[in-house]
Amino acid sequence: MLPVLPGGIAGQQCSTPALSAVQAAAGNTTPLTGYTITYAISNVLLPLLGPVIVGIGFA
């Protein structure tokens, strides 16, 4: 689980350069599994929930 966590954090931030740095530090592609799942989810949730959160903040 621990090697997948940095990849998941990079995916949540939608940061491909961060994934490259994590893979270089790990020396393998294990963090890629955490990245793909969180990247896909964040690319759906950020555009959908962003306006909702801003609307709540200004309400």
Image (cartoon, rainbow, N blue to C red):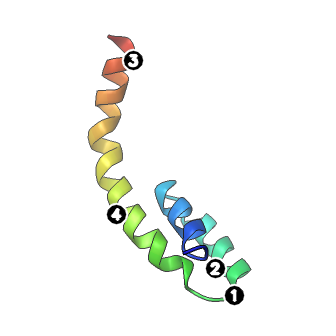
The local crowd at label 3, few if under 14, some if 14 to 19, many if 20 or more residues have their Cα within 10 Å, is: few
Q: Secondary structure at mark 1?
A: loop
Residue picked out by circle 2: 23
In this image, 54 relative to 33: left or right?
A: left
Residue picked out by circle 1: 27
Q: Secondary structure at mark 2?
A: helix
| Cα distance between the residues tagged 3 and 4 | 26 Å
The local crowd at label 1, few if under 14, some if 14 to 19, many if 20 or more residues have their Cα within 10 Å, is: few
Residue 15: image location, x then y, percent: 54, 60
Contact (CB < 8 A) between labels 1 and 2? yes
* Amino acid type at image mark 3: Gly
The residue sitting at the right extreme is 25
| Cα distance between the residues tagged 1 and 2 | 6 Å
Q: Residue at x 54, y 66 (%)?
A: 16
Q: Secondary structure at mark 3?
A: helix
Q: Secondary structure at mark 4?
A: helix
Using the rendered view, name the quadrant where residue 55 is placed. top left
Q: Residue at x 31, y 48 (%)?
A: 45
Tell which circle, 2 or 3, labels the residue nearer the N-terminal end.
Answer: 2
Tell which circle, 1 or 4, labels the residue nearer the N-terminal end.
Answer: 1
